[in-house]
Image (cartoon, rainbow, N blue to C red):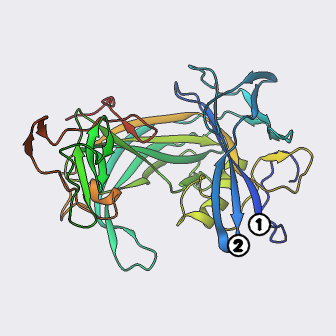
């Protein structure tokens, strides 16, 4: 990797087979989880990758030169102390050591300010997202934002979103039935697996439940030709038309440094059809993290620091036309839910309901801003 503050394009002479380190790290000024995720992406021929979280690393973030240790909370995910918030103007640097003793560090990043989101609105798009062959389209609600770009400096932005959808189905059993707290089995007297291929039974949530979805596209912008002007009608995301009922979306507008913007812009050009940072691109870009003992090692990802402006938007979907995809169908290969028949057994009525088990993509806690 070159000098500080530089983003290098990938050298095609580097060997792609073997391990590639992927760093997904972000610090913002919001009261939210501040994390570093480390993954070893095992590269195979024909651009195939298998991910393994890097556990047991020693991770620190230097804030204006003072070190803060991070704690591994889940496999490969390291967090700053609870309640930590970045501050505009402070300087940050990521450092970590692998269990094998390899030492890495990022460039020094300064937290940039960001203007507020002035307005969020949506438009239904019946041809929102095309498949790779453009043979069919997924209808979407396209979300747009208005904001005012400051006139006193060059500014760089990234937009992301989080979607909460109400989920009615919390567990599925194939070839068996639900016999415990989200456990499938077939050894009870009332077990009668579905005889119809593919032999599924699906179970309603016992209480309210929401599934979370996250933007995967890279969406960045530089104010090169609009410095100090209003940014009007910038598309900040496309939300698939999963179901007719409303959903909640949080739009995030994050400030980037010039170097981070260039990295994401190059990343966007290579991987827009593949996904986000968790997906190793077919031609990896070297970001701002390097191996101190081997500067030719491929390290994918960027240690991002920047202030964030957020807005939660209720997507009522009243402007939609046509038939929605179906949330369950979209998550299960276009298969419709198959409820277990209602019967009375010596042990009570069936079917039972299933628990809403919290995870990174599911919550039983009603999100702030939900309207139904």
- Residue 92 as seen in the image, left or right of residue 333: right
Identify the residue shown where x is 73% and y is 59%: 285
The residue singled out by tag 1 in the image is 17
Numbered tag placed on residue 45 in the rendering: 2
Which quarter of the image is occupied by the N terminus?
bottom right
Which quarter of the image is occupied by the C terminus?
top left
Q: Nearest the camera: 292 or 44?
A: 44
Numbered tag placed on residue 214 in the rendering: none
Q: Position of residue 269 (x, y in %)?
A: 61, 66
Q: CA distance from mark 1 to mark 2?
A: 7 Å
Q: Nearest the camera: 166 or 202?
A: 202
Q: Are marks 1 and 2 in contact (CB under 8 Å)?
A: yes
Q: Position of residue 2 (x, y in %)?
A: 88, 53
Does any portion of residue 6 appear in the rendered image?
yes
Residue at the right extreme, as displayed: 293
In this rendering, is residue 311 above or below 221? Answer: above
Q: Secondary structure at mark 2?
A: helix
- Residue 342 as seen in the image, left or right of residue 121: left
- Residue 294 as seen in the image, left or right of residue 154: right
Identify the residue shown where x is 31% and y is 46%: 185
Q: Position of residue 213 (x, y in %)?
A: 41, 47
């Amino acid at each position: 990797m070159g000098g500080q503050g530089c983003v290098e394009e990938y050298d095609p002479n580097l060997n792609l087979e073997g391990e590639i380190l992927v760093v997904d790290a972000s610090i913002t000024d919001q009261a939210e989880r501040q994390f570093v995720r480390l993954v070893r992406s095992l590269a195979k021929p024909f651009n195939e990758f298998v991910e393994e979280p890097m556990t047991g690393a020693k991770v620190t973030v230097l804030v204006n030169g003072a070190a803060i240790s991070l704690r591994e909370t889940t496999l490969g995910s390291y967090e700053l102390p609870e309640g930590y918030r970045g501050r505009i103007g402070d300087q940050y640097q990521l450092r970590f050591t692998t269990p094998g003793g390899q030492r890495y560090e990022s460039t020094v990043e300064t937290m940039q300010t960001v203007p507020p989101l002035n307005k969020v609105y949506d438009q239904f798009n019946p041809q929102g997202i095309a498949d790779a062959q453009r043979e069919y389209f997924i209808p979407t609600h396209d979300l747009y934002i208005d904001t005012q770009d400051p006139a006193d400096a060059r500014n760089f932005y990234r937009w992301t979103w989080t979607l909460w959808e109400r989920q009615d189905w919390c567990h599925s059993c194939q070839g068996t039935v639900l016999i415990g707290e989200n456990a499938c089995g077939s050894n009870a007297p009332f077990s009668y697996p579905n005889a119809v291929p593919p032999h599924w039974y699906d179970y309603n949530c016992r209480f309210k439940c929401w599934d979370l979805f996250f933007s995967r596209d890279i969406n960045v912008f530089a104010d090169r030709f609009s410095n100090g002007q209003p940014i009007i009608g910038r598309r900040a995301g496309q939300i698939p038309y999963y179901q007719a009922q409303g959903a909640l979306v949080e739009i995030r507008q994050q400030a980037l440094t010039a170097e981070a913007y260039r990295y994401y812009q190059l990343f966007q050009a290579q991987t827009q059809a593949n996904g986000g940072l968790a997906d190793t691109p077919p031609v990896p870009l070297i970001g701002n993290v390097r191996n101190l003992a081997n500067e030719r090692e491929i390290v994918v990802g960027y240690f991002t620091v920047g202030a964030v402006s957020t807005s939660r938007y209720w997507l009522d979907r009243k402007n939609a036309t046509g038939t929605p995809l179906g949330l369950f169908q979209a998550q299960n290969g276009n298969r419709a839910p198959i409820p277990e028949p209602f019967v009375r057994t010596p042990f009570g009525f069936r079917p039972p309901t299933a628990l809403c088990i919290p995870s990174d993509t599911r919550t039983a806690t009603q999100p702030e801003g939900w309207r139904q």
